[in-house]
Each structure stands twice: as C-alpha cells, then as structure tokens.
Image (spheres, rainbow, N blue to C red):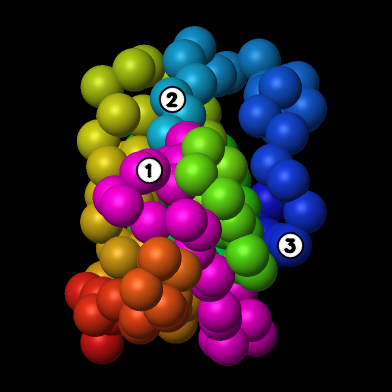
C-alpha cells in the first residue's frame, strides 16, 4: 500500500494485512510529531506527485534489498504532538534486509517526496526548510 492520507494511521490494522507466508520478519518505522517547542505541525503535499514518488521508492527498495513487501503511508494536514506522521512497514524473509530497506525508504522520502512542513509555535507559523529537492 502506498498512500497519502488525512486520516489517522492504524498500525495494528496494517500489520494484520500482511498475510504473506514467505515473510519471516516485519520491520516498522512510525514517525511521530515530537515536541520541539511547537504546538502542532501542518503537512502539505503535491499528492499525485508524492504518491508516484513513494511508489518509485518502494520499487527501488523491493529490487535493491530483496524484500517481499513495502507499505508506506504518509499523513498530511494539521497534526499535534504525538500524532503519527509516517508509517513504513517492510516485510522480508530475514530481518537484516527488512531493516536496511526500511532505513533506505525513510531516507529517500526525506530527500525526494514533495511534502512540506509548517510548524505552529507560540510566536506564529514558520515553514521548515527540508531536505526535499
């Protein structure tokens, strides 16, 4: 599954949907909004391009690390501290490949996916310079 969503991410539901008997390990990364002296964040995206880029990253991970599956769900909209932002779930026959692929995916997301973050602070709002493009 590749998705950009405004809905909360249900980690347990995502794990239940794997069902592939050749998967011996599932590695998940759940990125959450942390308290960096902010009140909330707002994530915006060029959704069509973001979904396309997430699919490309998944395909790169599938071929480059020999994994069985890779799901990526990224939220947009206004989020508060503690809310999940991104879920990456990688299934592989062995854990080593799954861990390496998961790290590759999050690094590539930060480099290439058109998603932008605006922080809401007591002093007002500010766009955060990112690693994108």
Residue 10: x percent and y percent? 73, 34
How many C-alpha atoms fall within 10 Å of the one at disc 1: few (<14), some, or many (≥20)?
some
- Which sits in the foreground, 61 or 73? 73
Magenta part of the chain: 30-51
Q: Point out which mark residue 27 bears.
A: 2
Q: Which residue lies most toward the front here?
A: 123
For residue 51, above or below residue 6: below
The residue at 77%/54% (across/down) is 7
Q: Is residue 51 left or right of residue 99?
A: right
Q: Is residue 61 left or right of residue 52?
A: left
Secondary structure at badge 2 equals strand
Which is more N-terminal, label 2 or label 1?
2
Which is more N-terminal, label 3 or label 1?
3
Residue 129 appears in the rendering? yes
**Which is closer to the viewer, label 1 or label 3?**
1
Is-magenta flag for residue 32?
Answer: yes
- Which sits in the foreground, 110 or 126? 126
Residue 58 appears in the rendering? no
Residue 30: x percent and y percent? 47, 36
Which is more N-terminal, label 3 or label 2?
3
Residue 101: x percent and y percent? 32, 41
Secondary structure at badge 1 equals loop
Q: Point out which mark residue 6 bears.
A: 3
Q: Quadrant of the C terminus?
A: bottom left
State the residue position of label 1: 34
Could you say which quadrant of the image residue 122 lies in? bottom left
How many C-alpha atoms fall within 10 Å of the one at disc 3: few (<14), some, or many (≥20)?
some
For residue 75, above or below residue 103: below
């Amino acid at each position: 599954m590749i998705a950009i969503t405004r809905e909360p991410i249900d980690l347990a539901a995502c794990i239940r949907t794997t069902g592939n008997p050749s998967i011996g390990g599932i590695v998940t990364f759940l990125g959450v909004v942390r308290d960096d002296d902010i009140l909330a964040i707002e994530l915006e995206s060029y959704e069509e391009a973001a979904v396309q880029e997430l699919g490309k990253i998944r395909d790169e991970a599938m071929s480059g690390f020999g994994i069985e599956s890779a799901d990526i769900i990224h939220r947009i909209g206004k989020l508060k501290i503690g809310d999940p932002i991104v879920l990456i779930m990688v299934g592989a026959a062995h854990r080593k490949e799954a861990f390496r692929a998961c790290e590759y995916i999050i690094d590539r997301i930060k480099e290439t996916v058109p998603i932008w973050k605006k922080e809401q602070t007591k002093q007002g709002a500010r766009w955060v310079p990112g690693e994108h493009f």
